[in-house]
Amino acid sequence: MSQAQDNVDDEFAPTQTQGYKVGESKTVAELAALDQEDESLQRWKQSLGIATGPGGSNGPKQIIPKTLFLSSPTLSKPVSIEFDKSKDAKSHPVTIKEGVEYSVGITFLVQNEIVSGLKYIQVVKRAGITVDKTEAMLGSYGPQTEAYSKTFASDESPSGMLARSGTYNVRSRVVDDDNTIWLDFEWAFKLAKEW
């Protein structure tokens, strides 16, 4: 493996919690069958999507990332990047207004099985140098037909002439507790005086 590949793997290695052990993986059907006599537990499981119904089947676990979006109180409507139409997301940078509070979010589908410990990891580089790294817990989700949406903690965009010069290259990744990579996506943004 090359040195460059090692650095990428290090940048995207999820933070490990000392003493945490990933639990045994169970199918939706196995979880639904547990504690059948406990009515309140059955209602709770149904609220989590732990029941055989829409979104669940006998197929393999699947996470389908749909969109990445940017929202801000100063923005009339969120800027959205659709992953299935994202071939030029890196060559056509998103414009972010300098010095404003904004949030990044993601929408995704979960199919067939429960996914646990989803994490979003984002590395921002400018001129090849890492300037920011974000790691956010998405959580655990059951299968359903509607997309889940998660908005991350807000941040303030840099400001000033130096911040406005150049393009910021971003690589976003979604991984689960088993270190399965469900999304590995590159995009770019520029800072400007206006959206």
Image (tube, grey):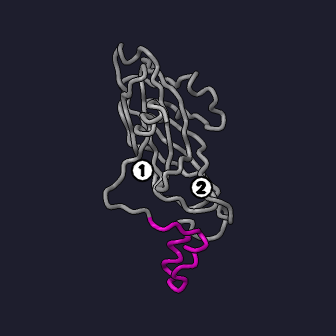
Is 134 colored magenta in this rendering?
no
- Gap in Å between the C-alphas at discs 2 and 1? 16 Å
Answer with mark 2 or mark 1, whichever residue precedes in sequence. Answer: 2
Residue 21 drawn at (x, y percent): 39, 63
| Amino acid tagged 1 | Met
Residue depicted at x 63% and y 57%: 111
Label annotation for residue 34: none
Is 44 colored magenta in this rendering?
yes
Residue 24 drawn at (x, y percent): 48, 68
Q: In the picture shown, does residue 26 fall above or below 119?
A: below
Q: How crowded is mark 1: few (under 14 residues within 10 Å), some or many (20 or more)?
A: some
| Amino acid tagged 2 | Val
Residue depicted at x 46% and y 51%: 138
Residue depicted at x 62% and y 32%: 86
Seen from the viewer's position, the closer of residues 112 and 47 is 112
Residue 84 lies in quadrant: top right
Residue depicted at x 58% and y 28%: 89
* Residue receiving disc 1: 137
Q: Is mark 1 on a helix, strand or loop?
A: strand
**Residue 26 placement, left or right of 3:** right
* Residue receiving disc 2: 110
Q: In the picture shown, does residue 133 fall above or below 117?
A: above
> In terms of secondary structure, what is the magenta stretch mainly?
helix
Residue 143 drawn at (x, y percent): 60, 60
- Start and end of the magenta stretch? 23-47
Q: Residues within 10 Å of mark 2 (few under 14, many from 20)?
A: many
Q: Is mark 2 on a helix, strand or loop?
A: strand
Seen from the viewer's position, the closer of residues 70 and 184 is 184
Seen from the viewer's position, the closer of residues 92 and 186 is 186
Q: In the picture shown, does residue 49 fall above or below 109?
A: below
Q: In the picture shown, does residue 113 fall above or below 83?
A: below
Q: Residue at the bottom extreme? A: 37
